[in-house]
Structure formats: C-alpha cells, structure tokens
Image: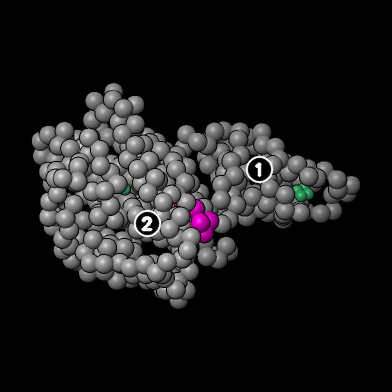
C-alpha cells in the first residue's frame, strides 16, 4: 500500500490551533508540512502566519520579541509588522534603503469559528483560489468550537488518516464501558457518496451497539464526512439539536502528525457536562494514540502492508483522492473527485 506519490498535499488549508492557544502579544512556532511558521495575533486580534526565519540571516522570528504590533529579531534587531514587512533596521546609518521592500513570507491564515487555519501553497508566489478552498466546518461563523484535545501521532499523515477513517479498529481499540465491547458485533451497511474533496457516509441512524450514541434519545441521525487533507467531520442531529465533532490531522513533518479534536453542540446539558464529556473524548483519542505508538514500532522495520476488502476501502479512496489532488496541482487543472457512490459492509 505504499504510495509512490509525494507525502504532502499543497494548496490546501491545514488546521493550526484552536483559537484559545494563540494569545495576543505572543508568537508561537509551529512546524507544518516540515515548514516552520511563526503564528501570532495582530493588534486587532486577527491571526497571522509568517515564515519563521528572519530574512536577514535566518534566525527564527519566534526567538525575538513581539509587543503585539512589531516583531523584532533577536540577532540584529530588524523590525517587522504583522504582515511581515520590514519596518526598521537599527544598524543602518543612512536612510537611502527602502526597508519596506524587505518582506518575510506571509502565509494565508484565517480564524473560522474559533479555530485557526493556515494555507500551505505549492508555489509561494501564487495563491489564487486559496479562499475558495477554505474548509466548511458545518457551523455558522458566529458560533465557536470548543477544544477537546491535541495529540501528536508518531506516524506520517497517510498512516494517521487511515487510522482515522478505519472502521475495523473500533472493536478492538475503543473497547470501553461507555462505548462498546467486542462481544456485541453487528454487520453494518453504509452508503457513501463522493463529496467535494472527499466522501461522505450518507445520513443514518447511529449504530445501535454504540452505547455512546444510545444516550441520545429521539430522532438521532449522523452524517460523517472525510475531506482532504485529513479532516473528519461528524454532524449529529438530535431532534432539533445538533452536535458537530471534528477531527483534523495536520502533518508536522514526515514522521509526526498532529491530531486535533474540536466540538460544538446546541445541547445545553452538554455544556453543563463539558468536563466529563471532554474526558471521554480524550480517553477515546488516548486509545488511538496508544495503538499508534505500537504501530510506529512495527513500521520501523518497513514491513509490506495491505489494504483488504470493504473495511479498508476508505483508505483506498484516500489514496485515490490524494493522487487526483496532486494531479490537479501539478497540471494546474480543476480537481476531479475520482470516487463513485458505493455501499460498503463490515462487522464491528
Ligand atoms: S538575523 Fe534577524 S536581524 Fe539579523
Ligand atoms: Fe480510533
């Protein structure tokens, strides 16, 4: 199942932080797709993302000072505004040089419903179409997501995505009193349709053997959507109320992927029970992390792997989508979703 394509997808938006992690007056370095980026908020609170190298001699800007308006490099004190334009070079004795011509690369960066996203371009000088590809988080922009958890998976983006959309591990990895046990298995039938940059599992009643869902009485239905580069969005309707649960995967580098889980609900009781609910979410993610640490060990010897049958079909689709995305970027042509509607069966 090894893929001969490049590991990283460009010209896409990646989840960087839950908004609460980015405080005014602070610069935060984060590696995304192997690029080091300095994130901050400007005086208006708007997030920005700059290449984390001073254009003078490359020292990380995050090693310098930031007063909420001006970033100053710690080496020779060059100053930059929040869009990366140089505003001053302290050691220059004459003002013949137009320092404003010196720029730090600025990545497109947006805050959507309390979450911060950054666009990683293939060609840093060409950004057309970036805004059209902003992720749809299924939520009105005036509403905000809560942060559940952030963990670093010790695996590359491909293994991490496959783990995220893999139905068969649930029986064995997520055995717990609040979810389900491996003694209570059922044959499942799921209908899938291609959707934007991925595919979606048509709206259905949640599994009757999932205790986690059975507490949500009355007209419950769920729709699960996967979108490149690695976002899984679940929308649950409970009568008039809704729950949105999103897991994002952001490649930090070729060996590590950050998983973030965000959550939104209109159910008042869930806000009241937020601390225990968040605890359950974290337990769930901790179970995945545990098996991924074992997987990391297994992958060290570079074994041959396989994708078998319907339970692994979504992983095959992921590779097909990736291939099509790479092609559209390389050929500068519109993305064509290569998938067809399909019904899959598995026992979980
Ligand atoms: S390296 Fe930043 S000012 Fe010289
Ligand atoms: Fe899992």
* Along the line of sight, the residue nearer the viewer: 157 or 231: 157
**Identity of the residue drawn at 33% across and 45% down:** 246
* Along the line of sight, the residue nearer the viewer: 37 or 132: 37
- For the residue with label 2, is its CB less than 8 Å from the closest atom of ligand 2? no
**Identity of the residue drawn at 31% across and 34% down:** 280
Task: Tell me the chief SS of the magenta region.
Answer: loop
Disc nearest the viewer among 1 and 2: 2
* Along the line of sight, the residue nearer the viewer: 204 or 72: 204
Span highlighted in magenta in the image: 253-258
Q: What percent of the width, then of the height, locates residue 300?
A: 48, 60
Relative placement, left or right, of 48 versus 177 is right
Q: Is residue 193 above or below residue 238?
A: below
**Identity of the residue drawn at 67% across and 36% down:** 66
Residue under numbered circle 2: 161
Residue 257 lies in the magenta-colored region: yes
Q: What percent of the width, then of the height, locates residue 49?
A: 57, 48
Q: Residues within 10 Å of mark 1 (few under 14, many from 20)?
A: many
Q: Secondary structure at mark 2?
A: helix
Which residue sits furthest left? 218
Q: Is residue 263 above or below residue 159?
A: above
Residue under numbered circle 1: 62
Q: Quadrant of the N terminus?
A: bottom left
């Amino acid at each position: 199942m090894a893929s001969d394509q490049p590991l990283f997808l460009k010209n896409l938006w990646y989840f960087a932080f839950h908004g609460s992690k980015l405080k005014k007056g602070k610069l935060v370095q984060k590696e995304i797709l192997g690029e080091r980026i300095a994130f901050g908020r400007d005086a208006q609170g708007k997030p920005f993302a700059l290449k984390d190298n001073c254009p003078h001699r490359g020292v990380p800007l995050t090693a310098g000072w930031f007063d909420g308006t001006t970033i100053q490099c710690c080496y020779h004190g060059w100053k930059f505004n929040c869009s990366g334009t140089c505003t001053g070079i302290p050691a220059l004795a004459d003002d013949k040089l137009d320092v404003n011509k010196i720029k730090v690369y600025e990545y497109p960066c947006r805050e959507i419903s309390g979450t911060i996203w950054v666009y990683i371009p293939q060609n840093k000088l060409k950004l057309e179409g970036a805004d059209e590809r902003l992720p749809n988080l299924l939520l009105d922009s005036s509403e905000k997501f809560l942060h559940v958890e952030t963990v670093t998976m010790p695996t590359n983006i491909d293994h991490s995505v496959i783990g995220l959309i893999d139905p068969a591990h649930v029986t064995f990895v997520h055995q717990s009193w609040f979810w389900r046990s491996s003694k209570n298995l059922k044959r499942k039938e799921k209908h899938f349709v291609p959707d934007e940059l991925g595919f979606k599992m048509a709206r259905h009643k949640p599994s009757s053997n999932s205790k986690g869902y059975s507490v949500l009485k009355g007209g419950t239905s769920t729709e699960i959507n996967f979108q490149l580069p690695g976002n899984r969005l679940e929308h649950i309707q409970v009568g008039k109320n809704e729950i949105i649960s999103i897991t994002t995967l952001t490649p930090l580098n070729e060996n590590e992927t950050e998983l973030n889980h965000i959550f939104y609900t209109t159910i008042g009781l869930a806000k009241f029970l937020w601390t225990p609910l968040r605890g359950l979410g974290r337990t769930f993610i901790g179970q995945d992390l545990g098996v991924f640490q074992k997987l990391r060990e297994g992958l060290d010897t570079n074994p041959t792997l396989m994708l078998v049958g319907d339970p692994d079909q979504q992983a095959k689709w992921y590779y097909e989508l990736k291939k099509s995305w790479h092609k559209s970027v390389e050929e500068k042509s519109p993305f064509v979703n290569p998938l067809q509607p399909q019904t899959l069966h598995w026992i979980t």
